[in-house]
């Protein structure tokens, strides 16, 4: 399935999640559940569109520090295989319309595992040059999140 | 952390404090003066300055004095030293996966006690 992994542009996160595959699937496909984990607290997430079919729209918004909801992710589902796979990209928006800022395609796969669910997120990026776009789109804000995650990493291993 | 070069130890050490992380988060939005940065904290200025010095010494931030105002700004080079662009993307997805995992494991525990 993953035919052209590129170590400079792709990342893969693989994890066994100790929960039934149906629960993981539901957390990804039930918009009320999705909103609860997609964005780190205390920021809040609102799912405006989640049309689970190829060409269907995925649109989320973010509210930070109790402020107004702002655009977050705007993408398009490419494949929805019940309980098995979700593929989406922000290179397209709903209805396969080309997006302003293509950036990444994500392939989420769920497999049965004796301990629960074998969960893999494979994310492919267009190019490193996109970092500039990312910066224009508010990379500075993103750094706050990264710092926080780094800090959590440090704390959890301290 | 074994895989990180020794020179990065100071960077991580500086992050191991909530005040310094909050300062970095604030500076992530753009440069700010010491008094702006200190405002949210119930802390004497000398104590707060220790945190600023720690961030500056470790290389997370740089400061500049204009007259009587000292301005702090984030040192982006250090972020990339710790986290390349792709690693930053990875951190975002790791975070998402952490939260998904936490969400489904706590939810399924409730359903199946």
Image: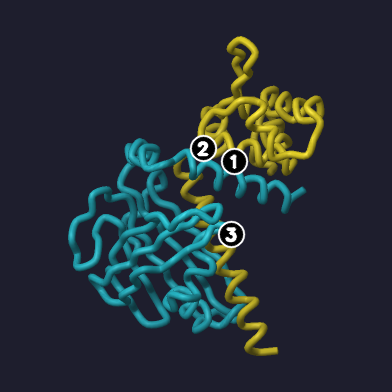
The span from disc 1 to disc 3 (Cα, nearest Å) is 14 Å
Q: Which residue is mark 1?
A: B25
The residue carrying pointer 2 sits among few (fewer than 14), some (14 to 19) or many (20 or more) residues within 10 Å by Cα, namely some
Q: Secondary structure at mark 3?
A: loop
Q: Which chain is cyan?
A: A
Q: In the rendered view, how is the structure colored?
A: by chain
Do tag 2 and tag 1 residues touch (Cβ < 8 Å)?
A: yes
Do tag 1 and tag 3 residues touch (Cβ < 8 Å)?
A: no
Let me know if residue A109 appears in the view.
Answer: yes
Q: Which residue is mark 3?
A: A41
Q: Which mark is residue A31?
A: none
- The numbered mark 1 sits on a residue in which chain? B
Image quadrant assignment for residue B12 = top right
The span from disc 2 to disc 1 (Cα, nearest Å) is 7 Å
Q: Which residue is mark 2?
A: B29
Q: Is residue A155 left or right of residue A125?
A: right
Q: Is residue B54 left or right of residue A33?
A: right
């Amino acid at each position: 399935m993953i035919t052209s992994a590129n170590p400079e542009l792709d990342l893969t996160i693989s994890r066994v999640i100790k929960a039934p595959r149906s629960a993981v699937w539901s957390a990804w496909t039930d918009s009320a559940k999705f909103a609860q984990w997609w964005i780190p607290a205390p920021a809040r997430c609102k799912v405006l569109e989640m049309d689970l079919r190829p060409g269907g729209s995925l649109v989320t918004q973010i509210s930070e520090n109790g402020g107004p909801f702002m655009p977050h992710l705007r993408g398009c589902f490419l494949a929805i295989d019940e309980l098995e796979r979700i593929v989406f990209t922000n290179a397209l928006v709903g209805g396969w319309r080309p997006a302003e800022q293509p950036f990444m395609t994500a392939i989420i796969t769920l497999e049965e595992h004796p301990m629960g669910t074998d969960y893999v997120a494979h994310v492919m990026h267009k190019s490193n040059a996109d970092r500039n776009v990312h910066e224009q789109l508010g990379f500075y804000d993103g750094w706050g999140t990264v710092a926080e995650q780094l800090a959590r990493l440090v704390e959890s291993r301290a | 952390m074994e895989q990180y070069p020794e020179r990065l130890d100071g960077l991580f050490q500086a992050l191991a404090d909530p005040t310094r992380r909050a300062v970095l988060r604030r500076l992530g939005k753009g440069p700010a003066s010491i008094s702006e940065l200190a405002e949210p904290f119930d802390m004497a200025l000398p104590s707060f300055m220790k945190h600023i010095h720690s961030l500056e010494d470790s290389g997370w931030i740089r400061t500049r004095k204009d007259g009587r105002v000292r301005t702090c700004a984030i040192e982006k080079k250090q972020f990339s030293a710790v986290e390349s662009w792709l690693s930053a993307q990875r951190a975002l997805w790791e975070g998402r996966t952490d939260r998904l995992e936490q969400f489904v494991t706590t939810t399924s525990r409730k359903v199946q006690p």
